Image (cartoon, helix red, strand yellow):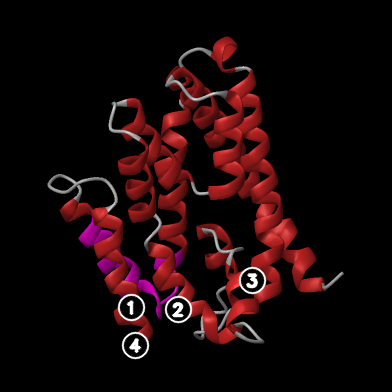
Amino acid sequence: MNEAFRQGVRLGIPFSLAGFLISLSFGALAVQSGFTPLQAIVMSAVVHAGSAQFAGLSIVAAGGGALPGILAGGLMNARFLAMGIALAPSLPAGPLVRGLQGQAIVDPSWALANRGDGTFDRWQLMGSTVPQYVGWLSGTIVGALAGEALGDTDRFGLDAIFPTFFLGLLIAEMRDPRSRPVAAAGAAIALALVPFTPPGVPILVAAVAALVGLRR
């Protein structure tokens, strides 16, 4: 096995543990909101994106329907367009193969694989995603099947893990002088828009900062 892949697996384990707890909350909330356990599990297996899944779930639970929930989830994941554009030159082969490799992008893996010079280690990216995917899916399974026993997941403080998770990623990017201005601009844009715009819009607009940084 490639050494960079193995290193990525090791680096991804702590994020996998955090993802397990977050998805545990998602699985329980999804079933409490009317999803079947199978629907919640399949959603995590296919989407594997916490912000998108919680956004879609909140809209469906409020009676908004499946289509608005899907659109909200897609809007939340729009940041991956900018991340994919930055990653693409580091991936070999043709568009189809690059697209398949790009499915390994999740926020921590993208940050961990960033070499700091505009290039990415694709093996480390994929390696770090493997334990995170396992943690996310297994947490959803436990939450969906044992949700009634867990009751209100907020009492365990699980609702605080998700924002803390992304704050940690922001702090890591702020330590790099090259990425600091872009990270700070993205954070400022998102914070300014949160009180006035629907879920997903702040992240989409904040991604513009990443595109400006890529152009520079």
Residue 158: image location, x then y, percent: 48, 29
Q: Residue furthest right?
A: 1
Residue 85's mark? 2
Residue 215's mark? 4
**Is label 2 in a helix, a strand or a loop?**
helix
Asked whether 188 falls inside the magenta stretch, the response is yes
Compute the Cα span from label 3 to label 4: 23 Å
The amino acid type found where label 3 is placed reads: Gln
The quadrant where residue 40 appears: top right
> Label 4 neighbourhood size at 10 Å, few (<14), some (14-19), many (20+)?
few
Compute the Cα span from label 4 to label 2: 11 Å
Asked whether the residues under the numbered discs 1 and 4 touch, taking CB atoms below 8 Å apart as contact, a structural biologist would say: yes
The magenta-colored residue range is: 173-190
Asked whether 91 falls inside the magenta stretch, the response is no
Provide the residue designation for mark 1: 211
Compute the Cα span from label 3 to label 2: 13 Å
Q: Is residue 97 left or right of residue 185?
A: right
The amino acid type found where label 2 is placed reads: Ile
Q: Nearer the viewer, residue 187 or 171?
A: 187
Q: Earlier in the sequence, mark 3 or mark 4?
A: 3
11 vs 87: above or below = above
184 vs 177: above or below = above
> Label 2 neighbourhood size at 10 Å, few (<14), some (14-19), many (20+)?
some
